Each structure stands twice: as structure tokens, then as C-alpha cells.
Image (spheres, rainbow, N blue to C red):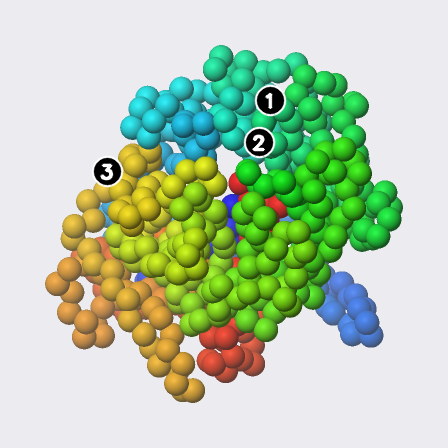
Amino acid sequence: MKMDLDRRQFLAGSAGALSMSLIPPSLWAAAARGTAPTAPVARIEVVRDTYFGEILSDPYRWMENSKDPDWLPFLKGQNAHTRAVIDALPGRAALLKRIEQLSGESVATSRVQRAGGMIFIQQRPLGADNFKLFVREALSGPSRVLVDPTAMSGAKSHVSLDWWRASPDGKYVVYGLSKDGSEDSLLHILTVADGKDLPETIPNTEGANPQWLDDTSGFFYTQLTGAVATPERYLDAQARFHKLGTSPKSDPILMKRGLVAGVDYEKIQVPTIITSPGSRFAILQLADVRPEARFFIAPLADAIAGKAKWISFAGFEDEMTDLELDGNDLYLLVNKGSPRGRIVKTSAAAPSIANGTVVVPQNALVIESLGRARDGIYLKIMDGGISRLRRLNHDGQVADVALPFDGTIGAVFAVPNEDGVLISLQGWLEPAGIWSVESAGRLADTGITPKPAIDVSAYEAKRFFATAKDGVKIPYTLIYRKGMKQDGSNPTWISAYGSYGLAAYTPTFAGRTLALVDCRRHRGLRQRARRRRVWPRMAQGRTAHQQAQHLARPDRGLRRAHRQ
């Protein structure tokens, strides 16, 4: 699973910033004619730069200097004007009250992992200011705190849990902590039975992505070498191996630039050694800012000993974005020539995309990622903004897994030694939760994430398709109060997005946005208003068909090195 920024969640979280788009300009003008102080006018001081022979003019470069004497007064004046205009809007008090009702605290669960018959949960409880790591003996059992960053914080210092991974037997957890938002992780290892840390710690492990051995005697990890707060921080990272109970200073460096003959790469590319339970092979990934990566393979024993002869089986040009290693078999998610993704099966002993067998060909839907469980490989699918789930069985057949509602699968949490998976799932009117998926296809909400006290029975969410001029079907969803007449007389908030090769507005629990759905009941907010959010530089010049093809591309930000 990916650990970097999820653009979909970021964009969905921006909904509140657009709430005032429902308010017609006439109401803004009316409020502004009241007691609002005059909005300050920013001074113009043009700065010109020349890039590749083109002159660019910036009239407000001075605003980048926070010590400019005009900057703070301008900000305060703009804030005072805006505050006065907003406070004077008719119906604002009722709208604010409803937003407050819908914006109460809720529990947030960001990640789970099954290991050793237990379940590990990263969650922010009610009233907490930070995510904590818990463990349960069973899905419905009581939780025990393993890592509480808040308890480690002081009056002038804040500690965050950056990442973690339990060992396959659930005996240990390796995790990273950082201070004051630095993300400069210090690696720790704790024993689950007593919650106590082992004595060894490892610095510079922001992107450690630890990979345990089956016997839990140690793990591979990635370590940064560049100085903190410098442009070189993320350059020339190195892959190492740590054996429990030994000094990290003696951890062998297994891969760094210039170390291994035949494995040449640029300093921006990060090496990560990946393991898979039950397999005698290890994977070396070289990744940079591209969603694709380079992949090599070698016997696991040789990798541990630092004697691996890494064999390349995929380059950036192959557009491979995910993989699963199942014993002696490799399953590769390949996008070259199949922008919606195809799955190729090949031998781990002699891997080859060209000579492999296509076990899941490209089809109308987008394959986003793979997750291996004991009963098969689960496929996270994108269907025009709606998530689907399928399983590639051991007999080569692909089975659909019916979800309880149209929604967004945030992540699929699979472990190779257990059947089924856990998924994070939410919909427009269904709060986020952790659901269990059994081999037989039965789904159930685990209850790990308690539901917020929001009654959604008065609302509906329905999916439709609009037809563009070139005939392409464009999906959209309407969220409205039940019984609303769809006659064009209702105030409408329209939000759209089309960049980065992803469907940004996948189903995300409406929450406080329901207050906007209720706006028609507030006098003064009945006038029709629309706002359309676009990023013109990314979509400029595209036909609807071109844009649809662009959005059909998988979200390739899923890199194996960032999967947990």
C-alpha cells in the first residue's frame, strides 16, 4: 500500500473550501455593501525572469518575502474584509450550526495488518491529536496500545508515528518516529508481548520500508545518506540489512550507487530490497519520481549475504507499476501497451515480461494494484471513479467480489499466509470503515472504525453518465435530499477535476458537505449558483475522448517500495 500523499483524499478533503461556491455573487455584493471594511489593494511590483528565452512577469513576487512591511498588513486587511462579508451573509448562522453538527470528531483508521493471528491497527481515537499503534488478539477483541507518540511528546515537542510493519509471526514491530513534523524517522523495534523496545535504533530511515525475513531474525531497510534540510537529503539512499540484537553500525550495505557491477543508476533513484513470505527470492526495486520503476531479482540467501547477482527483468520503459512474488512465480502489473493494465505471470527463476503468460488481459476497467493472500491475488480495480474488487484464483480464473455499495477502496490489506483480505472502504453516504473479505465473497464491517453519529437516511446518492460531444460517457454522482424534484430549480454545487491520470473525486463520505445539500432550506441561499473547479493547464486542448483516455490510466503512484 502506498504511504505517500493520496491525492484523492487531499482533493476530497478540499470540499469545505468550496462550500461558499453555493452563495450567489448577489449575496456577496449585498453583504459587502454593509459594514465590511474596504479590502486592501496589493501593490504591484513587477519582477521579470527569463526562462529558455521566454520572459515571465510576476507582479506579486514581493509577497514571498514574509518580512516585507506591506505583507502582514495586507493579510490582516484581507482577512478583516472577508470575515465581515462572510459574517453578514443571510442564512450563514443556520448553515454554520449544521456544519458544526456534522463536523464532530470521528475515529480515523489509516492502516491495518494481520500477523501471527493478531491484527495491528494504526488509528486516531476520539479526542486524540495523533495516530497511535494498537494490537488486538482478534478482530472483535480489545485493543492494546503499542506505540503512543502523544505520550512521548512534550510541551514544546511533538512526536509522530511515521510508518511501521509487524513481523510475519506478529512477535515484533519495526516502526519509525520523528519529531516536530520533520519526518526524519528514527527506527525502533519493539517486542509485541511486552510492548518494550529493543536497544538498537537506526537514524535516517524516513523511507525505510522494512522487509522482514520469514524467520523474523532481521529485515532489509532503506536509509537516507544526505544531510537533513538540504537538497541532497533524498539522493544516494542505500539498502541495508539489520539482524536483530546486533549493532546497526555493522549493518551491511547491500546496494548503493556504484557498489554492484551491472546495477548502474542515477543518484535520485532509491534502492529497496523486497521480500515475500514463502519465497526464496528477493526483489530489488529502483524508483524515483516516476510511477514506474526498475526491477531486479536474486536468490534471497545471496541478498542477505551481500553476494547477490541481480538480474534485471523490468526497466522504466516497461511501465511496470506493481508486482507480487508467490513462491517461484512472479505476477507483474504491466502498463506498456495496455494503459489500463494487464497482469503477466512469469517464472521468478528466469523472469521475462515478453515470454510470460498474460493471466489477466487489459479490459475496460483499470487495474490499480495487486495484493497476495493465501486464496489468490486480489485486484484493486477502478471503474470510472468507483472501486471494484476481483480475485485471481490459483486456477487462473478471475472472480468478482461484490461490494456492499458503490464506494472507494482506499487500500487492500493482504497477507500471503491467510485467506481473504481486509479493505478500507467508504461511500458518499457510508462512513469509512475496515471491512473483512472472506474467500467465499462475504463482506462484513469489522467495527474497527466506529461510525460517526450522522444520520444519512434523508439523503440519496445516485450515479449517472453525461454524454460528451464526441460520444464519451462521463460518470457523475448527484447527492441530494430524498424527494427533491430534479427540475433544474435547485442550487447546485458542481465540482470536477481531471489531472494526474486519476479520478480525484471517488466516493468519499459526504460528512459536513451534507450541510450544503440542506442549503435550499435556508432563506437567502435559494438562488441557483454553480462553480466548476478546473486545472486548465492539465486539461487544456483535450477533447472529451482524450480526457477520458487520460483518466483511464491507472494511478501509478502505487510503488512496491511504498507498499505495506
What's the CA distance linking mark 3 and mark 2?
Answer: 43 Å
Q: Residue at x 66, y 57 (%)?
A: 351
* x then y, percent, for residue 529: 32, 68
Which numbered tag is attached to residue 521? none
Residue at mark 3: 453
Q: Give the crowd class for mark 1: few <14, some 14-19, many >=20 residues within 10 Å.
A: many
Q: Amino acid at mark 1?
A: Ile
Instruction: Read off the residue under disc 1.
Output: 189
Task: Please indicate whether residue 338 sits to the left or right of residue 294 in the image.
Answer: left
**Residue labelled with disc 2:** 214
At a point 52% along the width and 30% down the height, the residue shown is 168
Foreground label between 1 and 3 = 1
- Give how far across and how far down residue 166 sits, in percent: 52, 29
Instruction: Give amino acid for label 3.
Output: Ala
At mark 2, the secondary structure is loop
Q: Nearer the viewer, residue 327 or 315?
A: 327
Name the kind of residue labelled 2 in the image.
Asp
Residue occupying the far left of the picture: 483
Residue 163 lies, with reference to residue 409, above or below; the image says: above
